[in-house]
Amino acid sequence: MEAAQVSIGGESLALRGIVARPRRHSRTYAPKRTCASNACTTVLSVYNPSAFCWQHEEAHPFVLKIERKDKRAG
């Protein structure tokens, strides 16, 4: 990794690190949707892809999708 040289107030500094990648925007869904369950008036979040609120959605396995840091990279 090559250091970038930056001058601040006449003093030269070497910056090291990784270049940050821009994050992907979260997917959104129609606003003001309500739960599809009978008699439920819960307003769903724009980030909830389901037609049901958390109380009425069927149970399903939870899979966390994140990038893992490579343990070999030091």
Image (spheres, grey):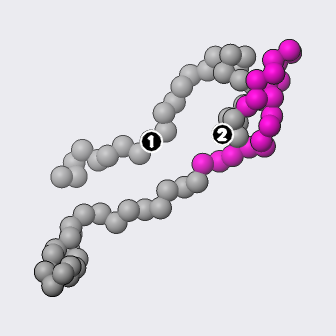
Residue 47 circle label: 2
**Residue pictured at 78% horizontal, 43% vertical:** 30
Residue 50: percent from the left, percent from the top?
72, 31
**Is residue 68 visible to the viewer in this orientation of the structure?**
yes
Q: Secondary structure at mark 2?
A: loop
Residue 36 drawn at (x, y percent): 83, 24
- Rendered view: 33 above or below 67: above
Residue range highlighted in magenta: 26-44
Give the tally of numbered discs: 2
Decide if residue 18 is on the left or right side of residue 41: left
Which mark is nearer the camera, 2 or 1?
2
Please give the residue where the numbered disc 1 appears in the rendered image: 66
Displayed quadrant of residue 29? top right
Q: Is residue 5 visible?
A: no
Say which element carries label 1.
Answer: loop
x and y, in percent, of residue 22 in the image: 47, 61
Q: Nearer the viewer, residue 59 or 24?
A: 24
Residue 42 placement (x, y as % from top left): 76, 23
Which callout, 2 or 1, points at the residue further toward the start of the chain?
2
Inspect the magenta stretch and tell me whether residue 4 lies in it.
no
Prevalent SS, magenta region: loop
In the picture shown, does residue 72 fall above or below 59? below
**What amino acid type should be assigned to the residue bearing mark 1?**
Ile
Indicate the amino acid at tag 2.
Tyr
Residue 53 placement, left or right of 62: right
